[in-house]
Image: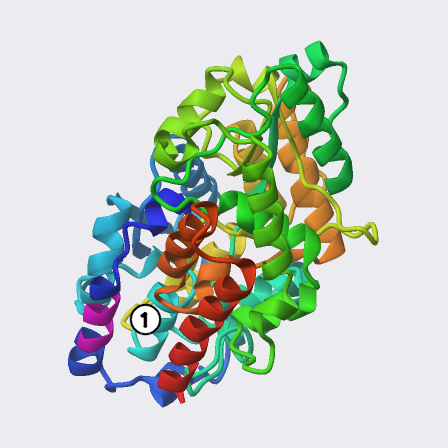
Amino acid sequence: MRVLRARMATTVAVVAGLALTMSACAPGGGGGSESSAQPSSISTDIASAGTVTLKMTDFWGSAEGKWIDQAIADFQKKYPNVTIDRTSEDWGQLNSTLNLQLQDDAGPDIASANNGWQSLGTLAKGGLVVNLDSYAKAYGWDSKVPTTIIRQNKFTTDLKTMGSGSWFATPMARTSLIGLYYNADKLKKLGIEPPKTLDELEVDAAKAKTAGEIPFQYGSLDGSTSALLGVQAVLADKNKLNDYVYDVPTVKASDVGMKEAVETVKKWADAGYFPKDFAGIDYQTAVANFVKGQGVFRWEYTGSLGLSTEQQKHFGYVQLPQSGGKTVGVGAAPGAMVISAKSKHPEVAAAFLDYLMSPAAGQTAVDLGLVPALSPDVKVPETSLSLTGESAAAKTLDSDDGYVPYFDWSSPTMLDTLGQNLQLVFAGKMDSGKFTAAVDADRDAFLAGQA
């Protein structure tokens, strides 16, 4: 699952190692021209492809593992001539070895990578994954997928710019968002309805504080950025925020609501809306505290609370809209699906990637308690308050084309820059202006290296 804790496990040293290994060992060296080569024709007649076995490697377990197993079973039922041999690995292990696996002739045909420069961009640069433009055209992906999600899977063919150019990965009919969870029992006790705007949320937080409750469960010991990025998505211009992450150097952090978001979460901290000892609370403890009933609200990645079926009845989720009424939210598929450049059956692999974006795959996700995407007509169990809210949020973001990418995709070191400097802000050692300057310095230094 692509959540904050997992992403923080990827170090700069690993990223640098991936890039060096690919440059030295990958077929075609940098891979720009090789990876952009397109087949002359595409067949979508998978039933006539003969007997095909595809190897697949991913990092999903628990409900996500059940989801992909069911998707494989359904695809194989539709195409009995195809067998998909799946291997699941630890997230950190897969991300540190995927480049080597894709260089191996016996490696996987299909794999789940991480979006952004840390993983997908590095694999594309190494010429290790297939340019999917021809398949996108054959299956109509440009019309099926919101443009803000399409951008998350694209790089220019010179592999210098993210967010435009050619398809190098695909999403799936699932999504991971950052939004606002609430304890429904506490809201009822306080006489508060779930907030519909950021202003309403701040009023509700004040009421919760007066009543002796912790308005926001949060811990900053390991640099958690979910509250910051959740607020930023409510405040920022969607197009500018996308452009910032996707390498447009003229857009600066002050243009994308970062300064205002920093000031908002600092205001909450100063008002006592976080736990008294939040600077000493780590991420996992904050999650556990919220689920145990400590706190009225929590900004969080969907799926990260680990709610049981019973707990889903007591926790809700909202994606707060912007002041203009449109909804913008941080979100992406929980993995970027790629096809190995060494695959002997890329057309069959592409058909499976297309199936993972289907409404049927989306319904399977909901049935397993996961957040669907690209599937407006899925049936969500009414007994799950949290999943009802999460699914409604995904449907709104799909229709509003409202996704913005994870901000740390803007450079391989951005996640550390955000987390470390946010700690300084809370400690009163950095203001919002210096924070945005540090963010720009990180992103701009990366872009200079790309040039």
Q: In front: 77, or 433?
A: 433
Query: Residue 338 placed where, x, y %?
Result: 39, 63
**Magenta-drawn stretch contains 19:** yes
Image quadrant holding the C terminus, namely bottom left
Would residue 447 be counted in the magenta stretch?
no
Q: Is residue 314 above or below residue 140?
A: above
Please tell me which residue is depicted at 64% across the width and 53% down the height of the picture.
Answer: 233
Q: Nearer the viewer, residue 298 or 45?
A: 298
Q: Residue at x 60, y 60 (%)?
A: 259
The answer to whether residue 131 of the structure is visible from this angle is: yes
Q: Is residue 49 visible?
A: no
Q: Residue at x 80, y 51 (%)?
A: 323
Indicate how the structure is coloured in the image: rainbow
In the picture shown, does residue 235 fall above or below 251?
A: above
- Using the image as rendered, state which of residue 210 and residue 401 is in the foreground: 210
- Residue at the extreme top: 189
Task: Specify the amino acid type for callout 1.
Answer: Leu
Q: Quadrant of residue 270?
A: top right
Q: Which residue in the structure is indicated by mark 1?
A: 123
Secondary structure mostly seen in the magenta stretch: helix
Q: Nearer the viewer, residue 222 or 109?
A: 222
Q: Is residue 266 found left or right of 12 in the rendered image?
A: right
- Give percent across and percent down for residue 143: 69, 65
Q: How many residues crowd mark 1 within 10 Å: few (<14), some (14–19), many (20+)?
A: many
First to last magenta residue range:
15-20
